[in-house]
Image: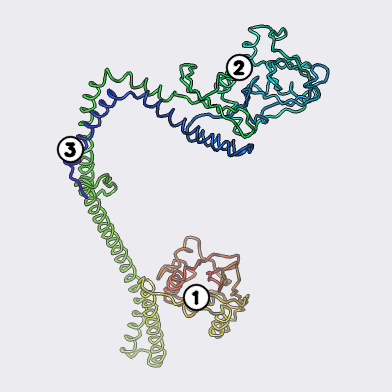
Amino acid sequence: MKIGIVSKLFMLTTTLCMLILVTIFIGQTIFFKQYYANQKVNKIETGIQSFTKDYLKAGEDVPAIQKLQQDFYQENTTWITTLDSVGNIRYTNDFSVDIHLDPPLDKNFSNRVMNIPLYSFIGLEDLQRVRYDLEQGNSILIDGVQKNDTVIPSILTVENNNVVLENVQLSEKLYGKRDAKDPKGSSQIFLKGVINKLQIPEGTIGSNIYTNRVLIDRIKQFQVNLIINENRYSKAEIMDYEENNIHYKIFISPIKDMNGETTYIFAMTSLQPVDEAVQMFGGYSIYLIIFVLLLIVLASFYFSKKIAKPLLQINDTTYKIANLDFSETIPITSKDEIGTLSYNINTLSNTLHSYINQLQEDIEKEKQLENTRKEFISGVSHELKTPLSIMKSCISILEDGVAKDKKDYYFKAMTKEVDKMDMLIVDMLELAKFESGTYKMKMEVFFIDQVIEYICEQLAIDITNKQIQVYKQLSKIQVVANQHRIEQVITNFITNAIRYTPEHQSMMVSAIEENERVKVCVENKGAHISEKHLEKIWDRFYRGDTSRQRSKGGTGLGLAISKNILELHDSEYGAKNTEDGVLFYFYLNKKV
């Protein structure tokens, strides 16, 4: 449905004002931060419940659990993982070190392979610094705390390189701030072993968790609190945490797995987006009224410019159209009255441009036709002048009774000139037919060598009279062309060659295969054509070269007719001087 410009302006202005009022109302009446936080907490709690059910169903299927964590993060933008009963992240074998414990220190742990997660001691970004210190075979000391049958390391010391890795939160909580070589605390346990294997994550969900140092630090703190007070996290809790002025929500939910052991669902989400939004909203209230007033003024100005802009474009474009400049069109950006007007002007411009171009083309064609007509009349007049003069002289002689004994001679001379005029008229009609632009060549398939042989037989008398030796190089090839017209071209080329070849000399006729085409050549011995005349020999009545004067015969239209025939075949053609004479050639397409 088309909407008028006035209605559109009214609706846009009204809508804009209503939006401003609604924005003011919402900003003053709704506590955005609290609403956002509550909504996100409720969504995450619901997600954790669903995650817990799916986690218990997955059992020990590690890829399935990692997939659950991945999906939870994508749906809630919240990190989630599972912790064992002592606060270690479960399934951390992708970022850990295996240590074969020595027997002497503690009989309960001797000759066992102990897997120690490395995220408690070092981040992935710092791994390269100590990676080669944790190579297989290096001796290592473990200082930690024992909880039931589990050892929770707080300090790792690589003896070979004197490298110390420390879980600072656990060390300080258990022993207080101290030197790592002088541990304190009654829960302390010492173990020694040899590094068996270092495992580094490669593109797993675990690697994403390890790079989040805030999450890892909270998990480590949770582990410390769990070791100090095991019953502290007996039920689900939601805690607030702040770091670097960014607020976080931490969700801890204890569950019992299939083996009856306690597992903790640990999730953490950032409230940074809502904090940023609240900060942005906080500064706008003072300037809101001023902003609204300015917005209304600017909006009115914008809409007036928006309406005036297409009108100015229409004015500029119509001015150019009035001066016959059709290079520009008016952009159509709407479906209202201005859009319709722009469309109509563009249509008018295109129509006028098309008609003017057509008119200019017709005028140009008419000029060319007039020039051609003048050239044609001039050429015909010149060609007819000589035979008419000869006939007039013969008639005068016969009327005066002079040289009665040569009466037959003069009649033969007049007959010869009449034949030439007849030939000239036939050629002119042929040429006019080809140059009309309406003649269509009917293509057929024929053997080019047979055509050339036939033409040479027809011209055998002329060849014999001048005692010319004809050499042929013909291939039995089928071509696609109009046979009658190609015969006419070849006849013209060979006739010219015979006419301008001195007696007792030779000429060459060839048809040679070149890729997908056939090249037909007629080369004769004799006088060269000067370079300045080579391109003009295809013009009607052109005899610029003194070696090719009318005394040699012909109407001067043969090559012009041949040119038109070859162009109607889309054929490449030409003439050039050779070492001993002149070569005429053209190309035809082979039968595929």
Callout 1–callout 2 Cβ contact below 8 Å = no
Residue 481, label in figure: 1
Left or right of residue 116: residue 346:
left
Evaluate whether residue 192 shows in this view: yes
Position of residue 94 relative to residue 161, above or below, is below
| Residue farthest toward the front in the current orientation of the protein | 260
Foreground label between 3 and 2? 2
What's the residue at 54%, 79% (across, down)? 446
Q: Secondary structure at mark 1?
A: strand
What's the residue at 58%, 29% (across, down)? 82
Point out the tag, 3 or 2, that comes first from the N-terminus.
3
Evaluate whether residue 138 shows in this view: no
Foreground label between 1 and 3? 3
Real-space Cα distance between discs 3 and 2? Answer: 66 Å
Q: Quadrant of the C terminus?
A: bottom right
Kind of residue sitting beneath label 1: Ala
| Residue farthest toward the left in the current orientation of the protein | 6
Real-space Cα distance between discs 1 and 2? Answer: 98 Å
Point out the tag, 1 or 3, that comes first from the N-terminus.
3
Q: Which residue is mark 3?
A: 10
Position of residue 52 relative to residue 471, above or below, is above
Left or right of residue 17: residue 180:
right
Kind of residue sitting beneath label 3: Phe
Q: Which residue is mark 2?
A: 224
Please tell me how many numbered marks the rendered image carries.
Answer: 3
